[in-house]
Image (spheres, rainbow, N blue to C red):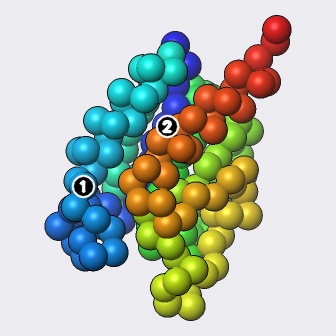
Amino acid sequence: MSLIFVLNGPNLNLLGKRQPHIYGTETLADVERDCRALATELGHEIRFHQSNREYEIIDWIHEAREAAIGIVVNPAAFTHTSVAILDALNTFEPPVIEVHISNVHKREAFRHHSYVSLRADGVIAGLGTQGYQLAIRRVAALHAAAAPQ
């Protein structure tokens, strides 16, 4: 089985409780459950993490360099501020898919800029928590396409 890292940034631990009119009522545990089920169906494993601390996300990206076929990342507010996360992602060669639960382009202007998008192979925004599953499917498809026949 191949490993996909799913990394979540600040405040996503409050998913389902924080601003449900924007982020919905599903919890991060619900998202993790759905990601694990899909990954298993596709023949992959998930390493699922959330942190409010930038350095932990960077450490997980470094760990993924040695173990993962791709990263699905919802950097949350770090999207708009973290050159450090961008630099870490730039050291990771397999696919990176950036996910946002809300449509960041319909929100405040500062949310329209993403440092992470400079590295991401794809960006999914505004599709709710289903965006995670779409991102996992894309990582799996890119991995399959790159595998020797």
Q: Nearer the viewer, mark 2 or mark 1?
A: 1
Amino acid identity at mark 2:
Phe
Q: Position of residue 88 (x, y in %)?
A: 63, 52
Residue at 68 percent across and 53 percent down: it is 122
As drawn, the residue found furthest toward the top would be 149
Query: Looking at the image, is mark 2 or mark 1 earlier in the sequence?
Result: 2
- Residue found at x 25% / y 44%: 30
Residue 10: image tag: none
User: Above or below — where is 145 with respect to 48?
Assistant: above
Q: Is residue 111 above or below residue 141?
A: below
| Residue 55 is at least partly visible in this image | no
Q: Residue furthest right?
A: 149
Residue type, label 1: Glu
Residue 83 in the image, given as x and y percentages of width and height: 63, 69
Q: Secondary structure at mark 2?
A: strand
Q: Nearer the viewer, residue 21 or 98?
A: 21
Circle 1: element type: loop
Q: Residues within 10 Å of mark 2 (few under 14, many from 20)?
A: many
Q: Is residue 13 left or right of residue 86?
A: left
What's the mark number on residue 5?
2
Q: Which residue is mark 1?
A: 26
So how many labels did they put on this image? 2
Query: Nearest the camera: 92 or 146?
Result: 146
